[in-house]
Amino acid sequence: MRIAILSDIHSNAEAFNAVLLDIDSLDVSTMISLGDNIGYGPDPNEVIHMLQEHHIHSVIGNHEIAILDKRFLALFNNSARVALKVTEAMLTKNSLEYLKTLQHSYVNFGFRFVHGFPPESVVIYLFQKSEPQLIKAISRLQESICFVGHTHQLGMISWDEQTIDRRRLNPSENIIEINTTQKYIINVGSVGQPRDLNNKAKYVIMDTDKNYIEARFVEYDYQTTVNKILKTGIPIQYANFLL
């Protein structure tokens, strides 16, 4: 089985559509989103419609939860709060009802899926945890792999019950074998709002038969998204991140 895991689409319909076309060219059985499907970008309703149309199971991200529970807005900087306010004004009734269905975590195929940090944190970043904290979290996992997003950067943490190993995923080393005797936390990057100086849309394929992950880097029409953002009132920095 080949599973496509996406995260942090952030209302970027052009990037999402390019990723879906890329997935369609591969032998993928199912797709899962790790949340932050909305926010920062110009097309939240279109992205939600695409998730529903393609039957993509999603967990909740911090942007979705801040729309539903205003107490979470305190965790955002001022620019992000402005972007969320614009996003909220765009959302249709159908989109808001969809957000209410999202759960904090999802377990299937022997894997765990969560936006921020296992077992089900929506707001904790992977980089915020020390090595002892990582060991504690990963050792408690019932699943062999936990897929996360939130940081917008591709990466992998592995644990062999003795040492923690961290590595980045990049275009020159985008296929990595999974050791079935180890446990992993894998960050699948961002489809629609990069933070790694590479403006391609990123996602990950998990091949459960051959035991490897593949990081995919997909070109898309980012200029169209940039132009849309500039017309919405969303802070310009979220357009600049796409360039």
Image (cartoon, rainbow, N blue to C red):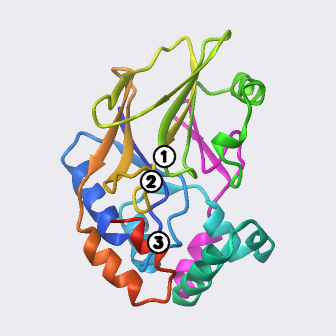
Residue drawn at the location 40% of the way across and 26% of the way down: 208
Tell me, for residue 153, which label it has, or none: 1
Figure check: 35 above or below 88: above
Estimate how packed mark 3 is, as few (under 14), some (14 to 19) or many (20 or more) residues with alpha carbons within 10 Å: many
Figure check: 230 above or below 123: below
Question: Quick one: label 3 or label 1, which is nearer the N terminus?
Answer: 1
List the residue tagged with mark 2. Answer: 190
From the viewer's perspective, is 46 left or right of 167?
left
Q: Are marks 2 and 3 in contact (CB under 8 Å)?
A: no
| Amino acid type at image mark 2 | Ser
Q: Are marks 2 and 1 in contact (CB under 8 Å)?
A: yes
Q: Quadrant of residue 68?
A: bottom right
List the residue tagged with mark 3. Answer: 238
Question: Quick one: label 2 or label 1, which is nearer the N terminus?
Answer: 1
Cα distance, mark 3 to mark 1? 16 Å
| Amino acid type at image mark 1 | Gln
Quadrant (top left/top right/bottom left/bottom right) for the N terminus: top left
Cα distance, mark 2 to mark 1? 7 Å
Secondary-structure class at tag 2: loop
Q: Quadrant of residue 20?
A: bottom left
Secondary-structure class at tag 1: loop
| Amino acid type at image mark 3 | Tyr
Start and end of the magenta stretch?
92-121
| Residue at the left extreme of this rendering | 25
Question: Quick one: label 2 or label 3, which is nearer the N terminus?
Answer: 2
Q: Are marks 3 and 1 in contact (CB under 8 Å)?
A: no
Residue 150 appears at what percent x and percent y?
Answer: 58, 52
From the viewer's perspective, is 234 left or right of 137?
left
Secondary-structure class at tag 3: helix
Q: Nearer the viewer, residue 30 or 122?
A: 122
Cα distance, mark 2 to mark 3? 13 Å
